[in-house]
Amino acid sequence: MDKSNSLSLIHASCIAVTGGKGFLGTHLIRQLKERGFGNILIADLPEYNFINLQDIERMYDELRPDIVIHLAAKVGGIGFNRENPATLFYENLMMGTQLLHEGYVHRIQKFVAIGTICAYPKFTPVPFKEEDIWNGYPEETNAPYGLAKKMMLVQSQAYRRQYGFNSIFLLPVNLYGPGDNFDPRSSHVIPALIKKCVDAVENGDAEIVVWGTGTATREFFYVEDAAKAIILAMERYDESEPINIGAGFEISISDLAALIVDLTGFAGRIVWDATQPDGQPRRMLDTEKAFRKFHFRAKTGFKEGLTKTIEWYKTELKKGRNIK
């Protein structure tokens, strides 16, 4: 089948998005609609709990999707990972394994598995290349989560070899953007820092406390760019080899904090709590394979993305909403 016919077939497909009510899911659903996909279904709590096999079977029977994009996940920042390793391993493993298997059983057209940068070894050379994913153990605080998600890669490749089942595995770097999780019990670093700074300005606080030493580096991926990457991969990529999706840059947590301090107008000082973990020492993806395979490049500048995220958070606060 030529590419034009393949794209026409995908655009006529019924697409179910697990976790479609979540942070990435809401942006993905909107972009799917904007790109002309007309049959999009949200598969999420409370209607379906994907830890339970019965709910997964019922989802496939009721929604009858041709394509499943699996975004649903139990996820959080360093503190949340440290406090909930068993929960993160079990729930993510059960969701991914059972959803992919039942996709094969129900003979769906394609399964799009969303992995995580946490699947990479702790000391992966920067930039992270896909072929390095098995060259060591992940950083300890997020290893249970990362390995649970990584099992979808093993399963995807095994099911393609044995059954010819079409599934793909994407490795996004840390996401951020409007609609992110700002709950201090489970948020990642960008929303956590934005909340600390904005709240400190509102309260007149002279300092904020930030975990770690600030020396660790991260790459951050604007959520709307991530949604675009997933759609392009769904349309154009049909192999089980993993593919990184990200923005292709690296920034230290100390520089990130300084940038957010500047953008939020916080005039106080940062206190680094070195008794708390830094997490993985460095993170940055090699994103060339995504460009070669489905012509994806991130478009949103980091300062632009942060500004949009901060303004969204401030707007929601003004509306009196309880942002989590």
Image: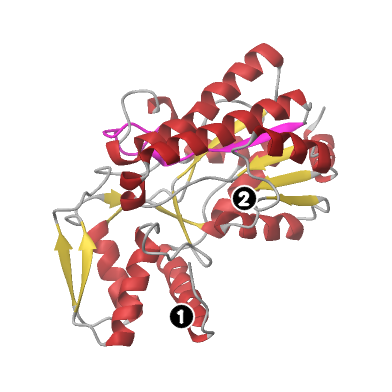
Left or right: where does residue 143 sit relative to residue 322?
A: left
Which residue is situated farthest in the top direction here? 162
Element class at badge 1: helix
With respect to residue 237, does 71 lie above or below? Answer: below
Type of residue at label 2?
Answer: Gly
The residue closer to the viewer here, 71 or 31, is 71
On whether residue 123 falls in the magenta region, the answer is: yes
Mark whose residue sits in front, 2 or 1: 2
User: Is residue 227 visible in the rendered structure shown here?
Assistant: yes
Q: CA distance from mark 2 to mark 1?
A: 25 Å
Residue identified by numbered label 2:
19
Looking at the rendered structure, which numbered label has been put on residue 247? none
Element class at badge 2: loop
Left or right: where does residue 187 sit relative to residue 256?
A: right
Magenta span: 109-129
Residue identified by numbered label 1:
314
Residue at left offset 31%, top offset 27%: 137
Left or right: where does residue 227 sit relative to residue 289?
A: right
